[in-house]
Image (cartoon, helix red, strand yellow):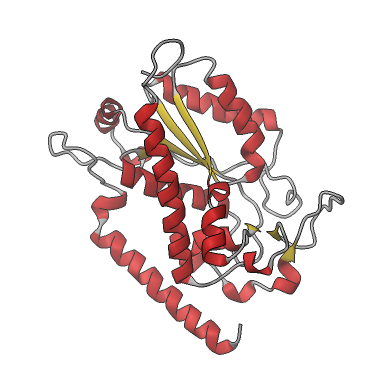
Amino acid sequence: MNLDDRHILSAIQILFALELVLVSEFNLKGWRMKKTRPVEDEPHFLFLEEMTTPVVERFLESGDPLFIPVGTLEAHGRHLPVGTDTMCAKGIAAELAEKMGGAVAPAFSYGLTNLLAQTAPASFFPQDIFRAYLETAIKAYIAHGFRKIVIVNGHGGNRDALMHMCRALVRETPVALSVIHWWLLAEEASKEVYGAVGGHAAAEETAAMLYFHPTLVDPDLYDSANDDFTPNEGMWLYPPPGEVLVYDGNPLGRPNMNCEKAQRFMKSVISKIREILERWLSRITRLKGGLRPS
């Protein structure tokens, strides 16, 4: 990327950020006070932590899903912030809740970082503690009457703990529970927009951050020669020689700083996730009995 290209990209990022600020200012009732249904003309707040208890009670009566973002603290190359996993999960959860009707719970920002555990400020602790903490919080939501829960996971290291937690929960209580590993559902869109599947801190996550938080992406700090690494199951390396993990080694999967492509990619991903969730939610009560949600 030459100097002129970087100046153009910086200008595009500034304009994109201004657009987001204007949208958030003039569309306050979008992300924060989305009215999903008329209930005595009261607004429906998007974020659970901003609700008063009467608003929470009305939300519970609506039967809309609760979206729970889960991420971690982890190095994402040198061009993305260490909170990328959580910020992507929270951004996707907010868009889904806004479009589908729903609320976003406070994010779980401390996950299970493994390969990059030696790079500050990586979040890591025993898997059973992570699972127990998350499971206890979700059981509390269920006990209070949240019966449709969608976990939006932004970090691959959390997958095993989430799988075991979900299997335990659905054997105990009639809850509709979904876990979204969004980057896995993004492979088709990544191939369509970028020509390849990327990986950690690569095309997909860079696109998501350009879409949700463009001013937090620093393209000048990315250097493929020093930052890229393709993991190989035949040899484990701690710490790895690069934090941008291009899993199949295809250069098309590297971070791409094109904001227009990032928008097209993320809109496609969110649309696909929404389509799957809406079909699921419309069919979960087709059978009755047992531990099925009512």
Q: Is residue 268 left or right of residue 100?
A: right
Q: In the figure, residue 11 lies in which quadrant?
A: bottom left
**Residue drawn at x 69%, y 65% as measured from the top left:** 250
Q: In this view, does 201 lie to the left or right of 229?
A: left
Determine whether 43 is above or below 269 in the image.
Answer: above
Q: Where is residue 255 in the image (x, y as percent from the top left)?
A: 61, 67
Out of 57 and 4, give the one closest to the viewer: 4
Out of 215 and 232, give the one closest to the viewer: 232
**Residue drawn at x 28%, y 42% as measured from the top left:** 45
Determine whether 119 is above or below 220 in the image.
Answer: above
Q: In the figure, residue 292 lies in which quadrant?
A: top left
Say whether residue 130 is visible.
no
Where is the C terminus found, in terms of image quarters? top left
Q: Is residue 26 left or right of residue 147?
A: left
Task: Determine the residue located farthest toward the right in the rendered image.
Answer: 235
Q: Where is residue 60 in the image (x, y as percent from the top left)?
A: 30, 27
Q: Position of residue 1 (x, y in %)?
A: 61, 82
Q: In the figure, residue 47 lies in which quadrant?
A: top left
Number of marks: 0
Say whether residue 164 is visible.
yes
Task: Determine the residue located farthest toward the left in the rendered image.
Answer: 40
Q: Position of residue 24 (x, y in %)?
A: 30, 59
Task: Determine the residue located farthest toward the bottom in the rendered image.
Answer: 4
Out of 226 and 107, give the one closest to the viewer: 226
Determine whether 155 is above or below 244 in the image.
Answer: above
**Residue drawn at x 68%, y 69% as measured from the top left:** 251
Q: Is residue 274 left or right of residue 172?
A: left
**Residue drawn at x 56%, y 66% as measured from the top left:** 194
